[in-house]
Image: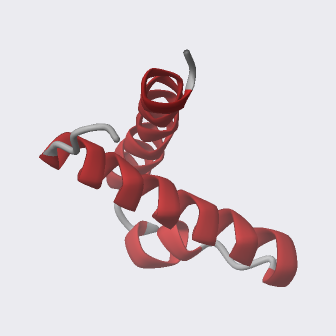
Amino acid sequence: MCKKSPLDFIAAILAIVGAINWGLVGVFDYNLVTHLFGSMPMVVKVVYGLVGLSGVYALFMLKKCCGK
């Protein structure tokens, strides 16, 4: 079993937020991130960037923990 760090937890939360947001966009055409931070476009970009980085991080962690 892999050791979990605070960064692993943060990346997992961001990936979950991203997945839920994409689910809402796909099913209901509702973008939660834009709804919450639409008046602050730079914050929206930062949130999307962090979600994307967390996805890349999750790929590396998956390979490290499960790929031999």
List x then y, in percent, for residue 56: 50, 28
Determine whether, in the image, residue 25 is placed left or right of residue 50: right
Answer above or below: position of 11 versus 14.
above
Quarter of the image for residue 50 reads top left
Q: For this view, does 24 lie left or right of residue 12?
A: right
Q: Looking at the image, which residue sits at the far top?
A: 68
Which quarter of the image is occupied by the N terminus? top left
Q: Nearer the viewer, residue 24 or 4?
A: 4
- Tell me which colouring the rendered structure shows: secondary structure
Residue at 81% across, 84% down: 28
- The residue depicted at 48 percent of the width and 46 percent of the height is 48
Closest to the observer: 25 or 42? Answer: 25
Where residue 51 appears, as percent x and y from the top left, is 45, 46
Which residue is located at x 51 percent, y 38 percent? 55
Q: Residue at x 42, y 39 (%)?
A: 54
**Please, is residue 59 above or below residue 18 in the view?**
above
Q: Which residue is nearer to you in this view: 15 or 27? A: 15
Which quadrant holds the C terminus? top right
Q: Position of residue 44 (x, y in %)?
A: 42, 54
